[in-house]
Image: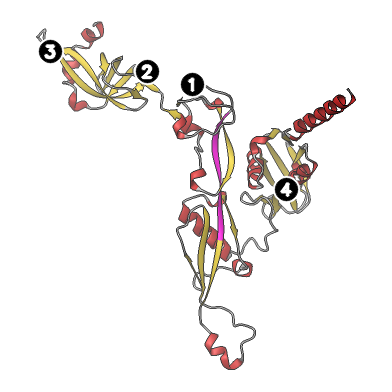
Amino acid sequence: MTKFANNLIILLILLIAAVVNSAQVQIRMQKEAKISTTNITLGDIAWVNAADENVRKRLETMVVAYKTTNQAYITVTSFDIARCLSEAGINPLGVDIYGSLECVIAFQGPAVRVLPNKVECETPVDQDVYTVEDELNKLVAENTGLELDRLVIDWGGNKDELLLMKFDPVRYEIKPQRSVTLGNVRYMIIDNNPPMPDDVLPQHEKFYRGRPTTEYVNGLVKYISEYVVAKRDMKTGDILREDDLKLIPQLVSSAAQIGIGSIEMLTGKELTRNISAEQVLKPNMVKRLTLINKNDPVYVRYKTSRIKISLKGLAMSDGSENDTIPVKVEHRQLDSNRTISQVLYCRVIASGEVLVIDNTESSDDTQYANNTDDRRAR
């Protein structure tokens, strides 16, 4: 009995430990803060709580902003915090960020600017100097077509001195050595006016003077992407609304990892499968909402600068909003009981409603105008 009780106590301790370890990290942001230090940390603008003491300390000391000139205030938002967490390798989905949506920071000294592409970095030597590294970063942004302030690039090798040199387009030539995409990149830097080596003898200087040198730098390019996730569990056939969705930042190193980054693109779409809360939405999970099905009766609207007509028709194919579909309509000829069938190409404007867009296939405007009341009566 004693052994059983001991085992039960041990089991309860393990269960409690598991619950504690799975607890979410909590970050409660302040509405405002006054800072006088050089480095602005998460602990300066938010209350941080975590089951793991080491995680809590790491988060509290995570640098989110640095001092610079020409500003006395900055605003750090909850999205900025989530982005920093993602860069630091912490999944934002496991962090509860609440309190104020943004923190306005007033500085009791030099002003600051937020560095969106760095979580922790050294204080810049001189923000006014455009360096070789700055040029490399710009070239990566141009080659990939991605926003520069969302790129996180780690340049490897022992070329720090070269990267920090002031960039002179006459002196330096920079050429990519492979296709530039997210992930690993490699550039060749040609220095057309390198300094003379210290150990060169005077009689040998003429062999080094004006001779270009070549260096290679490797980089790992990552991108701060935003992808849409569901706020709640949803079922097949549900229509996505703006309130059902939210954006989560993600640091990716491959173009294939970039998901749908626009809530607007998904709003109004229909789910093709069941999804759970916090699940990332992908293109194959949604389809455009079908407003008209084949063989549905529809109201056909026809508008010109002179007239507006509405008559009944039959849809000949399915259609979503702004789709062009063929619609069959029937009308009587003037001075005749003969009924004519006609196919009009129309744009879907609402459920059960279309607008004629191909005027060449419609009959004469005057004929329609003279028979509008008769068609509506039918």
The Cα–Cα distance between marks 2 and 4, rounded to whole angstroms, is 52 Å
Quadrant of the rendering where the C terminus is positioned = top left
* Badge 4 amino acid: Met
Number of numbered discs: 4
Q: Is 225 one of the magenta-colored residues?
A: yes
Q: Secondary structure at mark 1?
A: loop
Q: Which residue is mark 3?
A: 333
Regarding residue 195, the answer to whether it shows in the image is yes
Judge depth for marks 3 and 1 and give the one in front: 1
Give whichever of discs 2 and 1 has the lower sequence position: 1
Q: Name the residue: 51% across, 82% down.
A: 211
Q: Earlier in the sequence, mark 2 or mark 4?
A: 4
Instruction: Count neighbours of disc 4 (C-alpha within 10 A) and say few if under 14, some if 14 to 19, many if 20 or more.
Output: many
Residue 238 tag number: 1
Q: Is residue 25 left or right of residue 355?
A: right
Which residue does the numbered mark 4 point to in the structure image? 62
- Report how far apart the C-alphas of labels 2 and 1 lie in the structure: 17 Å
33 left or right, relative to 302:
right
The kind of secondary structure element at disc 2 is: loop
Residue hosting label 2: 351
Q: Nearer the viewer, mark 4 or mark 1?
A: 1
Q: Residue at x 26, y 27 (%)?
A: 357
